[in-house]
Amino acid sequence: MKFNIIAYSKDEYISGHTAYNKTTIKNMEYAKIPERVIYGSIRNISKYKPTKVKLFIENSTEYSRIGLNKTLEDQLNVQSLYRNDNFVIERAGLYPKGKEIGIEITDMILGIISVIIRNAYAVDSNGEILSNNLLGKKRFIYKNRLIIESILENTYYFEMNGLDRLTKRDLFPFWHEFIIRFEQELFLRENK
């Protein structure tokens, strides 16, 4: 499996654009950004091998309300035709939680990577637990660190700025900081 993760700050896009309403901003956030990310992943596969793509999107009230699956299907098929690419979005569906293993795995991996990048304290300097929930997540990640490392090797992390640019970031500095902090927290707990 390979993953592309894009992080962005909505505030970077909103500042200086007071003419846009919430609907326009949500359209960018829920439709345009995913469309560009997916297009970047499936374009230029091969002119000689037609590629049929199925999109699996976790259902939410917001996605259902705006018809995200249909919007992405239409926009990507138009892009393929316009750019003379050789892919077609055969189906784009919204799937509820617990029904599609790929969505569940993706959700879990995003959660793990979020915990790693944020690297919040679960234990204070006196060894007192600040959050049992966070400490449990960090223990799980640490215990499965060899598996997590192999996932991180196949994960591309980008930060998008307000200038329509993606900056590729290495996940391993985040990973190493996470390991160091968690081992410090273990030490503080044991020597409390």
Image (spheres, rainbow, N blue to C red):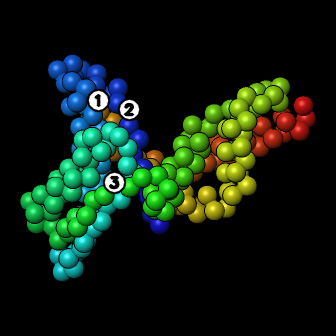
Dot 2 lies on which element?
A: loop
The residue at which mark 2 appears reads as: 9
Dot 1 lies on which element?
A: helix
Q: Which mark is residue 137?
A: none
* Residue at the image position 54 percent from the left and 43 percent from the top: 114
First in sequence, mark 1 or 3: give its number: 1
Dot 3 lies on which element?
A: strand
Q: Quadrant of the C terminus?
A: top right
59 with respect to 80 (left or right): right
The vertical placement of 138 against 151, above or below, is above
> Who is closer to the viewer here, 171 or 76?
76
Q: Position of residue 26 (x, y in %)?
A: 27, 34
* Residue at the image position 67 percent from the left and 38 percent from the top: 134
Q: Pick out the residue farthest to the bottom.
A: 48
Q: Amino acid at mark 2?
A: Ser
Residue 156 visible somewhere in the drawing: no
CB-based contact (under 8 Å), mark 2 and mark 1: yes
The residue at which mark 3 appears reads as: 94
Q: Position of residue 17 (x, y in %)?
A: 21, 23
Corner quadrant of residue 123: top right
> Who is closer to the viewer here, 166 or 150?
150
The vertical placement of 146 against 31, above or below, is below
The residue at which mark 1 appears reads as: 13
Q: Amino acid at mark 3?
A: Leu
Question: Can you tell which of label 2 and label 3 is closer to the viewer?
Answer: 3
Q: Amino acid at mark 1?
A: Tyr
* Residue at the image position 81 percent from the left and 28 percent from the top: 128
